[in-house]
Amino acid sequence: MKLTEQQEEMIRAFVEAQGVKRPTLCDDLVDHLCCVIESQRAADTPFEQMLENAVRELAPDGLAEIEYQTVFLLNSKRIIIMKKLTYFIGFIGSVALAAGVLFKLLHWSGGNQLFISGFLTLLLIFIPFVAFDRYKVAISKALSERLKIILGATSAIITGIAALFKVLHLQGANIMLILGAFIFIAGFLPFLFFTMYKKSVS
């Protein structure tokens, strides 16, 4: 039994309300849902219930997740290059940091420069890259999940810079340390445990 134009418009409005922004994907999802509902249509089942069943069968995690996966597949090469770059930077930063510590322990020249450059590479490049990658994964999820990532990365960067300022005996270390701790305690931790609680009861 064919759907009416009004019902097709209701399906399109539902798909758009789910946050699907790519027009071609939106059309494909609407066509697919229409076909599923028409093929499984029963006289005693309300249209809204059939739509809900069709969406649950197609995308248990929501239609926005399909768009994310589509974008991921279309940009997989670029994403893979970015991941390689991110972890290469993390590797270089870690090696420089560890070598700096070793050089300082052995009283070799260049220890401070290696330590600082490695520490800053991890702090100002690697951590933001990882946080951005995690944010893209969580962009279709709840606001609390995204805020957890942003606040966690921010508190880590500020606290890390404060620690470096402490080591180098630079001014402003205490203020940044307090700010980083405040963001961690009042911002990151509440969202962390809130998302953990949601996952435990879902």
Image (cartoon, helix red, strand yellow):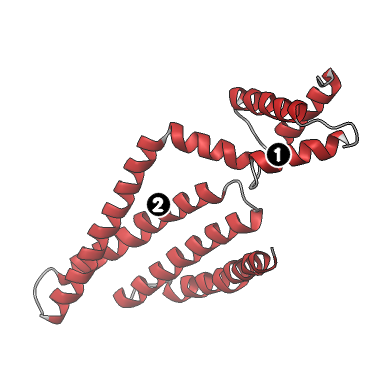
Inspect the image, locate mark 1, and give the three-letter code of the amino acid beneath it.
Answer: Val
Quarter in which the N terminus is drawn: top right
Residue under numbered circle 1: 55
Describe residue 100's horizontal placement relative to residue 198 as left or right.
Answer: left
- Three-letter amino acid code of the residue under disc 2: Phe
Which of the pair 79/96 is nearer the observer?
79
Give how far across and how far down residue 159 sits, in percent. 44, 70
What percent of the width, then of the height, locates residue 111?
A: 16, 71
Above or below for 82 versus 41: below
Tags 1 and 2 in contact by the CB under 8 Å rule?
no
The part of the image, by quadrant, that contains residue 113 is bottom left
Q: Quadrant of residue 188?
A: bottom right
The mark that comes first in sequence, 1 or 2, is: 1
For image coordinates 16% across by 76% down, the residue present is 102
Residue at x 65%, y 38% (from the top left corner): 58
| Residues at marks 1 and 2, CA–CA distance in whole angstroms | 34 Å
The 10 Å Cα crowd at callout 2, few under 14, some 14 to 19, many 20 or more, is many
Residue shown at 35% from the left, 47% from the top:
83
Where does label 2 land, which residue? 129
Residue 131 visible in the picture = yes
Q: Secondary structure at mark 1?
A: helix
Along the viewing direction, whichever of 173 and 52 lies nearer the viewer: 52
Q: Quadrant of the C terminus?
A: bottom right
| Location of residue 139 in the rendering, given as x and y in whole percent from the top left corner | 57, 47
Choose top left, top right, bottom left or bottom right for residue 187: bottom right
